[in-house]
């Protein structure tokens, strides 16, 4: 990787979260030193426990908003701190808005002071309930600013605006990754999202709770592919925004069936109330990521789900709740 000062020391906010911990792990394998910042609001110590023995890895328990200074060189700042599952950001609405607003400001200030490359973890949520399908980066989105999901959507949109302003005003080497639904090991079994919820229910033989009629779509990308995309963006000088996600779109009811089939579960499907403002459709156009980064996902939904479900089965057994 080439950076302004060639420093192979990265700061990851939200480094103990699902995506953050995978990024920490991958950067260490790429011979980076990693400073992981997390307040453990939704991240967990278990996600990074096995990295602590590595002298190149440093974990700091802290809210990004309370960081005064990060000593030493930093060549890359990855701002991934935020609750990310709808259940979490509804539980922590103000913290979610802070992570995307003043949290992004603090992270950008670190990048500015260190002359580091800066990557904002933005989200497909900036497209809201999209009227363009699949979504290209040029689409401005359809977001309800006072809706249930607005605490997350608008925080990410503000983060994008702030990142763009820092690039223009201060010349910070920024980039925006719009990350679509990602799944894989280390999601919390109770985080409320579709993949961990269906996995837990199917493994335990409980009814699988599909919201609405299950006809709404999502496109799920395996975490290793998402990490590849983010780090390829980090290695480039491209400002983005760039979509990072899978184009394998499917109805949520189909996802539920796939998961029950993979674990050979007899769980019935229960249709439950659909949350307000739940997007109808979501699928990225990833032509830009392919063109400017040479990135496209490699792992099929089926093979990614198999790995993930095996992990969830172990995890639930360890939690003493396995089938
Ligand atoms: N969903 C579901 N059952 C659940 C959890 C989620 O049917 O137990 C639905 C949810 O309403 C949405 C889709 O699955 O339509 C994806 O939800 P998730 O929370 O995983 O991600 P997001 O809505 O942020 O894309």
Image (cartoon, helix red, strand yellow):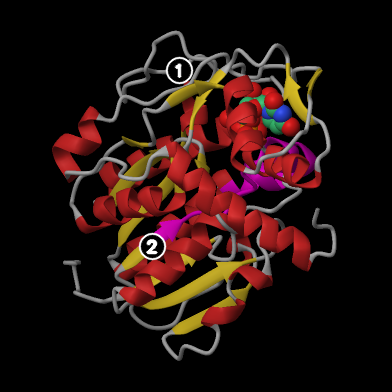
Q: State left or right for residue 17 relative to residue 132.
A: right
Bounds of the magenta span? 77-99
Percent from the top left, x then y, of residue 197?
Answer: 72, 40
Percent from the top left, x then y, of residue 293?
Answer: 19, 45
| Res. 77 mark | 2
Q: Measuring 61% from the left and 78% from the top, which residue is drawn there?
A: 49
What residue would you read off at disc 1?
Answer: 141
Percent from the top left, x then y, of residue 94?
Answer: 73, 42
Percent from the top left, x then y, of residue 96?
Answer: 66, 44
Q: Measuring 34% from the left and 56% from the top, which residue is drawn there?
A: 118
Question: In which quarter of the view is residue 177 placed?
Answer: top left
Q: Quadrant of ligand 1?
A: top right
| Res. 60 mark | none
Q: Please state the total of marks drawn on the protein image.
A: 2
Question: In which quarter of the view is residue 78 placed?
Answer: bottom left
Q: Nearer the viewer, residue 134 or 98?
A: 134
Above or below — where is 296 with respect to 48? above
Q: Measuring 29% from the left and 64% from the top, which residue is drawn there?
A: 116
Q: Compare marks 2 and 1 and give the one earlier in the sequence.
A: 2
Q: Measuring 67% from the left and 38% from the top, which residue is drawn there?
A: 193
Q: Nearer the viewer, residue 6 or 83?
A: 83
Which type of secondary structure does the marked residue at label 2 adopt? strand
């Amino acid at each position: 990787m080439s950076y302004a000062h060639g420093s192979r020391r990265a700061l990851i906010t939200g480094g103990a979260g699902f995506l953050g911990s995978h990024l920490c792990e991958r950067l260490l394998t790429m011979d980076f030193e990693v400073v992981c910042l997390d307040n453990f609001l939704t991240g967990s110590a278990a996600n990074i426990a096995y990295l602590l023995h590595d002298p190149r890895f440093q974990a700091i328990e802290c809210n990004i908003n309370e960081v005064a200074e990060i000593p030493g060189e930093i060549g890359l700042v990855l701002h991934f701190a935020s609750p990310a599952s709808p259940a979490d950001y509804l539980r922590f609405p103000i913290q979610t808005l802070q992570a995307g607003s003043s949290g992004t400001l603090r992270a950008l200030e670190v990048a500015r002071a260190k002359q580091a490359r800066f990557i904002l973890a933005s989200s497909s949520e900036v497209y809201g309930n999209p009227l363009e399908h699949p979504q290209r980066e040029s689409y401005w989105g359809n977001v309800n600013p006072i809706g249930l999901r607005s605490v997350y959507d608008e925080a990410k949109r503000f983060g994008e605006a702030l990142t763009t302003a820092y690039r223009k005003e201060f010349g910070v080497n920024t980039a925006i990754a719009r990350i679509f639904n990602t799944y894989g090991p280390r999601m919390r079994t109770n985080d409320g999202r579709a993949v961990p919820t269906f996995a837990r229910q199917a493994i335990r033989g409980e009814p699988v709770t599909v919201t609405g009629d299950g006809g709404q779509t999502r496109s799920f990308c395996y975490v290793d592919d998402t990490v590849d995309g983010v780090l390829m963006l980090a290695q480039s000088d491209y400002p983005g925004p760039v979509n990072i996600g899978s184009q394998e779109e499917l109805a949520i009811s189909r996802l539920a069936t796939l998961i029950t089939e993979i674990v050979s579960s007899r769980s019935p499907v229960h249709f439950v109330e659909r949350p307000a403002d739940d997007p109808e459709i979501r699928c990225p156009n990833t032509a830009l990521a392919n063109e400017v980064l040479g990135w496209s996902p490699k792992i099929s939904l089926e093979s990614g789900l198999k790995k993930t479900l095996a992990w969830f089965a172990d995890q639930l057994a360890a939690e003493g709740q396995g089938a």
